[in-house]
Image: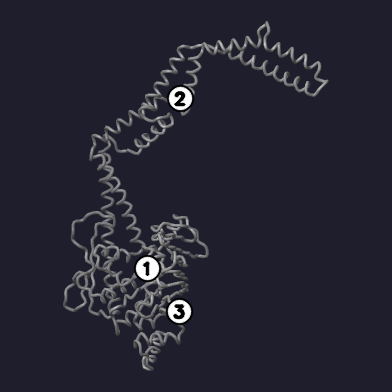
């Protein structure tokens, strides 16, 4: 349920914070006072489209905030888990800011969401039924969805099982059509990918191989230069006549004789000693390198051939060896996932046929279950309509005898048929129902569905327009019945509806500092009498209308 609603700089509302209760709450006030603005704010919190036009004149943005108790719905908690939204104390804080640029910032429990994901969450929180919401009843293609809502958990499980089977069937058909559409080019592509896969695999490439081969080729190509340089360097360091090591050793001996006389001499001696040992080590390294040298003309040819192979593969599959290896992985994946290539089309066709049979069987089961559900729904709606003073109504969920085509919800097509007059045949609801009758149909459906729909709050925005007298009283009682299972907020001009509500909020416009703003206050019992009397009498409230208002409240048990 909606626990609290905060609105700031929204339309003619400067700042407003309302606390709501369980049960039924009526929102009343003069036309144009801002009742529907509050409902608009709730709709925006649940993901409806918003624009900068909602922002109060002079403000840079409008801010909306709703505090909700969590619905007890497994699908709802799965959505929260998917979106990474944590909950504490079984509460959900929904926030939405709209700026002058039209930018929307949506948060749920502090986590920023896209508008689409906010809409997914909002679908579980609030169900807003306005004067235009009965348009769903005027769309026959929506009647199957309404019928399915009346099905219990067993039916919903069967429907989900069918949808999974249908999705698998569609996927297999898509694969089969993809192959059939151009089997020759498909097979040719598979052949080409197999060739490419084998060519790259047979090369046994290593990620850093090219760099290592280039380095080896440079050494092999400069073999004589390396031999000459090593020989000359070793000779200069170790030659019997005037070699560098002997010279450095003699200098070291001379400096060691005087090193104790001055710290600088000692430093020179130490440096000469380090140089002598480093030169000895270098001479040893040069000797080992020289001894290990061996020119292999065949190896140079191997390296050049290997580099040429890599060059050819780079020209076909990528600019570097890692890119070639990545391409090999990509085509291997495509070949692995292409389970139905070449001669396997026949196998796929068989699998499609088997899955089609499974899907049709489930669709037939859905059809039989819907027949039972349709009968129960028809009886329930007739019962509800009788309580709404449509005593002679007959209602039927009619299954259309069109061509059976598997679709996302099965092959059924249904349409609601209605007659409200004795002796008149049943006709499509869309052709015979008046505005008032549609409102009562909507209430009948909401009464039936509210028991298992799982919505935390249902909002009725003047759905009682165009009715009066005993019908108004019946509508009031019906809305109150819905409130037994869901929190109900009801914008109304009917005193009967306002009187039966558990709580009543009065909405009015006031002018402060030359600006119009909407004020909302919860009415205590004595103020409810005055407001309901105003709704009964209009501008002039008499003692008689006050007594009538008290009577209405008393009849409602207040």
Residue 114 lies in quadrant: bottom left
| The label number, if any, that marks residue 210 in the structure image | 2
Image point (36%, 69%), residue name: 128
**Residue position marked by numbered label 1 in the rendering:** 127
Q: Eyeballing the image, is 119 above or below 432?
A: above
| Residue 247, horizontal then vertical, whole percent | 71, 11
State whether residue 517 appears in this view: no
Q: CA distance from mark 3 to mark 2?
A: 80 Å
Nearer-the-camera pick, 198 or 526: 526
Rendered-image quadrant of the C terminus: bottom left
Image point (56%, 10%), residue name: 228
Q: Secondary structure at mark 2?
A: helix
| Residue 512, horizontal then vertical, whole percent | 45, 78
Nearer-the-camera pick, 251 or 334: 251
Q: CA distance from mark 1 to mark 2?
A: 65 Å
Nearer-the-camera pick, 306 or 379: 306
Q: Secondary structure at mark 1?
A: strand
Q: Give the number of the mark in front: 1 or 3.
A: 3
Q: Eyeballing the image, is 555 above or below 331?
A: below
Q: Give the number of the mark in front: 1 or 2.
A: 2
Q: Are marks 1 and 3 in contact (CB under 8 Å)?
A: no
**Residue position marked by numbered label 3 in the rendering:** 521
């Amino acid at each position: 349920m909606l626990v609290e609603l905060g609105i700031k700089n929204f339309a003619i509302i400067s700042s407003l914070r309302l606390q709501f209760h369980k049960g039924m709450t009526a929102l009343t006030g003069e036309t144009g006072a801002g009742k529907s603005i509050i409902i608009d704010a709730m709709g925006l919190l649940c993901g409806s489209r918003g624009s900068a036009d909602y922002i109060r004149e002079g403000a840079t943005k409008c801010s909306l905030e709703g505090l909700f108790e969590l619905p007890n719905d497994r699908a709802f908690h799965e959505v929260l888990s998917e979106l990474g939204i944590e909950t504490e104390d079984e509460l959900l804080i929904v926030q939405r800011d709209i700026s002058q640029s039209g930018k929307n910032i949506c948060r749920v429990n502090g986590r920023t969401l896209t508008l689409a994901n906010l809409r997914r969450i909002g679908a579980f929180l609030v169900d807003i039924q306005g004067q235009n919401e009965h348009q769903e009843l005027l769309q026959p293609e929506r009647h199957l969805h309404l019928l399915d809502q009346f099905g219990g958990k067993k039916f919903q499980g069967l429907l989900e099982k069918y949808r999974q089977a249908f999705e698998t069937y569609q996927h297999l058909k898509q694969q089969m059509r993809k192959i059939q559409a151009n089997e020759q080019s498909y097979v040719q592509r598979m052949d080409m990918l197999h060739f490419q896969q084998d060519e790259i695999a047979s090369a046994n490439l290593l990620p850093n191989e090219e760099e290592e081969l280039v380095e080896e080729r440079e050494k092999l190509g400069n073999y004589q230069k390396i031999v000459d340089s090593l020989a000359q360097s070793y000779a200069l360091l170790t030659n019997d006549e005037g070699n560098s090591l002997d010279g450095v050793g003699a200098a070291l001996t001379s400096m060691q004789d005087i090193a104790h006389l001055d710290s600088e001499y000692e430093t020179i001696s130490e440096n000469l000693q380090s140089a002598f040992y480093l030169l000895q080590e270098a001479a040893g390294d040069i000797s080992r390198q020289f001894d290990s040298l061996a020119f292999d003309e065949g190896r140079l040819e191997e390296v050049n051939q290997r580099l040429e192979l890599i060059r050819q593969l780079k020209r076909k599959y990528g600019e570097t060896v890692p890119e070639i290896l990545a391409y090999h992985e990509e085509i291997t994946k495509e070949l692995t996932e292409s389970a139905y290539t070449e001669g396997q089309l026949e196998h796929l066709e068989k699998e499609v046929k088997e899955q089609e049979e499974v899907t049709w069987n489930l669709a037939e089961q859905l059809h039989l279950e819907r027949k039972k559900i349709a009968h129960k729904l028809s009886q329930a709606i007739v019962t509800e309509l009788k309580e709404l003073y449509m005593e002679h109504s007959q209602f039927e969920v009619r299954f259309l005898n069109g061509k059976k085509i598997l679709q996302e919800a099965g092959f059924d097509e249904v349409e609601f048929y209605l007659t409200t007059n004795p002796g008149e045949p049943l006709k499509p609801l869309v052709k015979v129902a008046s505005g008032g009758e549609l409102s009562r149909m909507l209430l009948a459906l909401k009464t039936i569905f509210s028991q298992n729909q799982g919505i935390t709050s249902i909002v009725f925005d003047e759905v009682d327009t165009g009715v009066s007298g005993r019908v108004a009283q019946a509508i009031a009682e019906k809305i109150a019945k819905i409130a037994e299972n869901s929190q109900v907020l009801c914008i109304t001009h009917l005193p009967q509806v306002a009187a039966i509500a558990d709580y009543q909020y009065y909405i009015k416009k006031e002018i402060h500092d030359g600006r119009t703003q909407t004020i909302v206050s919860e009415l205590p019992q004595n103020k409810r009498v005055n407001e309901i009397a105003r709704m009964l009498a209009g501008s002039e409230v008499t003692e008689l209308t006050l007594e009538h208002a008290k009577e209405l409240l008393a009849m409602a048990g207040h």
